[in-house]
């Protein structure tokens, strides 16, 4: 059901006229458009912003998940191919592990953060000896850092962090989302906190994983590696130096983005803190208006930075009535992410239906409300009044 007009879009493009004009001026200089020096500059700036040693730019957040899963497998980081995956997230949080022949085990959502349920996760680790875990920082609400790291230490799994919808979110102690896992993915797609049109990033402090990602991202060649590492691999492989730089060490992929996207990314990093602060304030304004009337995520003293504000109606029928009211008033909305991924055909056809108690509630009752930096508190109040005016249907 589509509205005849949209007064409040669910998201707005973060690439503004200044960015476009700067891009046009740059393009007139006939620069290199494929991956080059600007990609390196963007990676350096993003690594510094998040606080990790490395960042690897690729062509989407989905590819970022693909890249870190494949690189960890190739680098021998996993004790086995059993991986715990979240019921609430996005299809490409899970799909790479299916594509690379892992054995995925789905975990229900936490009733407070909607991230992976740690009690369910620990029970799974005890039963299956899980080798890897991927968790989602759902809608930019920080998940349980210390508890996750305690479980990792206890059970020895490799930890992947899907932060694609959480750029700029922080823990109470100042730790940025994206520093919890051994590797963390980000997305710079339209509607997210920052945009490079298409684009993604993997952040890590793991030297071996970084070097493997650099090869996997570009066909499996070594020419993007630091010279000492490249020379080391050439020597180990007994390769004639004449074949440099096109020596292929692993069966790689091509997940590169371009310097055109990186040009925008360099500019986006400069406004990352501003965008995060605005989205955070908007998130708090929604919570103030809707507290006690709707269920939504809890974040304690952490700093949520959401791409949209997620709510749960009182029932599926109540949600339908809210969506109809919002659409009629020109407020763009959608159902809560993908809801429970365990009831989608891609999962059911392979593993059977997964019914998580919390994930099912999110699937049946969840919906999104707009959040973007330009949204004012008065506009948020108006949207919330509209939502609260809908009679509860049970």
Image: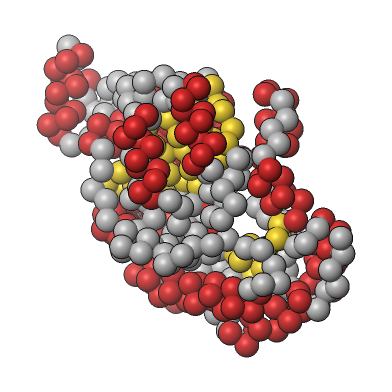
The picture places residue 176, in percent across and down from the top left corner, at 35, 58
User: Which residue corresponds to the image point at 75% horizontal and 56% vertical from the top-left?
Assistant: 365
- Please state if 291 lies on the left or on the right of 93 as rendered: right
User: Which residue corresponds to the image point at 71% horizontal and 57% vertical from the top-left?
Assistant: 366
Q: Nearer the viewer, residue 55 or 20?
A: 55
The picture places residue 136, in percent across and down from the top left corner, at 50, 47
- Please state if 132 lies on the left or on the right of 36 as rendered: right
The picture places residue 223, in percent across and down from the top left corner, at 25, 32
- Residue 303: quadrant of the picture: bottom left
- Please state if 117 lies on the left or on the right of 38 as rendered: right
Look at the image and name its color scheme. Answer: secondary structure
Q: Can residue 242 be seen in the rendering of this structure?
A: no
Q: Can residue 226 be seen in the rendering of this structure?
A: yes
Q: Nearer the viewer, residue 188 or 161?
A: 161
Quarter of the C terminus within the rendering: bottom right
- Residue 28: quadrant of the picture: bottom left
Q: Nearer the viewer, residue 83 or 260?
A: 83
User: Which residue corresponds to the image point at 32% horizontal and 59% vertical from the top-left?
Assistant: 175
The picture places residue 42, in percent across and down from the top left corner, at 32, 56
User: Which residue corresponds to the image point at 51% horizontal and 39% vertical from the top-left?
Assistant: 119
| Residue at the top extreme of this rendering | 238
**Above or below, 196 relative to 126:** below
**Above or below, 43 relative to 64:** below
Q: Nearer the viewer, residue 364 or 202?
A: 364
**Above or below, 351 relative to 139:** above
How many numbered circles are shown? Answer: 0
| Residue at the bottom extreme of this rendering | 378
Quarter of the N terminus within the rendering: bottom right
């Amino acid at each position: 059901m589509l509205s005849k007009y949209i007064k409040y879009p669910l998201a707005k493009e973060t690439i503004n006229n200044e960015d476009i004009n700067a891009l046009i001026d740059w393009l007139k200089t006939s620069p290199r458009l494929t991956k080059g020096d600007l990609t390196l500059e963007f990676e350096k700036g993003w690594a510094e912003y998040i606080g990790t040693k490395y960042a690897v730019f690729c062509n989407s957040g989905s590819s970022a998940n693909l890249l870190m899963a494949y690189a960890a497998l190739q680098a021998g980081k996993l004790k086995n191919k059993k991986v715990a995956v979240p019921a609430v997230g996005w299809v490409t949080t899970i799909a790479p592990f299916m594509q690379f022949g892992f054995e995925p085990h789905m975990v229900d959502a936490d009733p407070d953060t909607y991230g992976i349920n740690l009690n369910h996760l620990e029970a799974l680790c005890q039963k299956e000896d899980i080798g890897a875990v991927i968790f989602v920082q759902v809608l930019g609400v920080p998940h349980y850092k210390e508890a996750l790291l305690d479980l990792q230490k206890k059970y020895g799994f490799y930890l992947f962090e899907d932060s694609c919808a959480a750029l700029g979110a922080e823990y109470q102690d100042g730790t940025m989302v994206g520093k919890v896992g051994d590797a963390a993915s980000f997305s710079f797609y339209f509607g997210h906190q920052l945009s490079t049109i298409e684009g993604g990033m993997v952040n890590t402090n793991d030297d071996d994983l970084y070097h493997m990602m650099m090869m996997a991202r570009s066909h499996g060649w070594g020419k993007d590696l630091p010279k000492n590492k490249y020379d080391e691999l050439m020597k180990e492989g007994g390769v004639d130096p004449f074949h440099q730089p096109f020596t292929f060490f692993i069966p790689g992929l091509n997940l590169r983005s371009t310097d055109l996207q990186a040009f925008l990314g360099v500019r986006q990093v400069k406004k990352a803190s501003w965008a995060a602060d605005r989205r955070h304030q908007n998130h708090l304004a929604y919570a103030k208006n809707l507290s006690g009337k709707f269920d939504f995520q809890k974040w304690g003293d952490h700093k949520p930075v959401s791409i949209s504000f997620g709510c749960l109606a009182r029932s599926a029928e109540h949600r339908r009535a809210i969506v109809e009211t919002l659409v009629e008033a020109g407020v763009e909305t959608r159902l809560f992410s993908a809801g429970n991924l365990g009831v989608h055909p891609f999962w059911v056809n392979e593993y059977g239906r997964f019914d998580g108690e919390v994930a099912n509630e999110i699937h049946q009752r969840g919906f999104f409300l707009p959040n973007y930096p330009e949204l004012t508190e008065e506009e948020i109040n108006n949207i919330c009044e509209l939502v609260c005016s809908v009679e509860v249907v049970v």
